[in-house]
Structure formats: structure tokens, C-alpha cells
Image (cartoon, grey):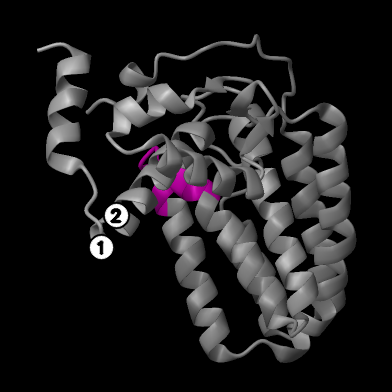
Amino acid sequence: MNQRQVVSERKGSGRPGKNGDGAERHEAIHRSISDAIIEHRLKPGARLREDALSEVFGISRTGIRKILQRLALEQLVTLTPRRGASVTRPTAEEAKDVFDARQMVECGLMPEVARRITAADLEALRDMAGRERQALKAGEQSAAIKLSAAFHGRLAHISGNATLAAFVEQLCSRSSLILAVYGNAGHLGCESHDHDDLLGFLEGGDGERARAFMSRHLKAIEASLSIHEEEEETPDLYEIFAD
């Protein structure tokens, strides 16, 4: 059976219903495309044609359009008039801007996080750090990148500043794409124990050492990137998404 027949059969059994199944199906498709981008199966600049995605996943073009709009809000996809959607292509300048912003915001939040962090926060964050290490060992790069971003977002929320926490989450979403595209497989650009070491400073209430450690941590990630231009392509969506 060829790939298109596989997809065709899946479309017949997986078409969303009018109620909750539709929302669940859209969420699954969003996750599939997001993972393909972060895992670099869909490369920067790759075109994402609505008609092809609609056929691959067995949902309407309107549904695909909504999913692409959501991915655009997350800055994983770029929407261009008369050209459609493509995987966002981060530049070296954009990568520097994102990590500079993370330096200013996340490092600045560490003293307040050290004052406010609780035992429950520490337990949850250590669990996240442990799952991130496990994902890397298992070769699950996409899961590890998402867990790392969630770790930094959770830290920012502990500061109590919801506006800055939301900004950190946006920056982490953008740097997740940058790391997925220009990072190294099996490694997130920092030592595997970095997050645990940071939590040690925060648990001890040492906000200044946590600030300095966070700065070194982010610089190490940025320094690990190997940014180069990708050729624009129209990928075979059947090959990428067929089971």
C-alpha cells in the first residue's frame, strides 16, 4: 500500500465530527504540524499548502486555515498574502534579538522568583527537568524542547508578574523554533543538569546567583546555535505525515 492510500484510509476513519471530536482532531493536527517543525522534518521556509494539508489530514481547508493561523500566532508559521503559509525562517539577527530579550527579562526575574518560590514549585520544576532529561536520552528532541520552554515559563509565572510571564512564554516559543532549527540533535545547548543547578540557587533564596547562572545558561544555548540559510522547498506532506 502506498503512502497516499495510507493517508486516504486514515482520512476515512479520522474525519472529525461536529462536536468534541472535531476540536480534539484539530488539536492533534496542530500538534503533528508543530512537532514536524520543531523536529525539523518541516524545514524553515517550507510551504504549507492548505489544499495539500486538507487532503493529508482529511479536514476542510477552513479547519486547516484556523490551525495555520494558530501556528502563526505562535510564530512557528508565517502567513504571507497571495503566497500562503510557510514555516517561519528565523534569521541570525532575530535569534540574537530573542536571546537578548530573554537575558533582560528572565535574568531580571530571578531575584523575585527566589523570594516567592515554594516547595511545591520546586517539586514540580524538578519533575519537569527530569522529564526533559529523559526525553533527550530517548531521542525525543521535540518533547525535550517543549519541556525546557515550559520550565522557563513556569519560573517566570512564579515571579507574580503575569505580563512579563506571558512575554517570556512568547520568547520561549520563538527560541524553541530557533533551537529546533539551528541547534544540535540530542542536545539543547546547555548541560543536562543546568535546570537542577538553577533550582538549587532558587531554593536557597540566592536570587543574585540565580540571576548570574541564568545569564550563563542562556548564553550557552545561544552560543551552541549553528545558523545557516535553508533552501526554500515544497515538502512532500504525505511522506511527512503518513503513518
Outermost left residue? 1
Q: Are marks 2 and 1 in contact (CB under 8 Å)?
A: yes
**Residue to which mark 1 is pinned:** 19
What residue is at 83 percent from the left and 28 percent from the top?
92
Q: Magenta segment: does it hold 136?
A: yes
Q: Nearer the viewer, residue 194 or 240?
A: 240
Relative vertical location of residue 9 with respect to residue 123 in this rendering, above or below? above
Q: Nearer the viewer, residue 189 or 145?
A: 145
194 on left or right of 92? left
147 on left or right of 19? right
Q: Secondary structure at mark 1?
A: loop
Let me know if residue 141 appears in the view.
Answer: no
Tag 2: residue type? Gly
Quarter of the rendering containing residue 2: top left
75 on left or right of 129? right
What residue is at 74 percent from the left and 79 percent from the top?
162
Residue 124 pos. (x, y %): 49, 77
What residue is at 42 percent from the left and 35 percent from the top?
61
Magenta-tinted stretch: 134-145
Residue 40 pos. (x, y %): 51, 27
Give the numbered dot on residue 22: 2
Relative vertical location of residue 62 with respect to residue 87 in this rendering, above or below? below
Q: Nearer the viewer, residue 106 or 240?
A: 240
Examine the residues drawn in magenta and state their main secondary structure. helix
Let me know if residue 168 appears in the view.
Answer: yes
Q: Nearer the viewer, residue 202 or 32?
A: 32
For mark 1, does the 10 Å Cα neighbourhood hold few (<14), some (14 to 19), or many (20 or more) residues?
A: few
Residue 106 pos. (x, y %): 80, 65
Total numbered labels placed on residues in the image:
2
Mark 2 vs mark 1, CA separation in Å: 6 Å
Residue 190 pos. (x, y %): 66, 46
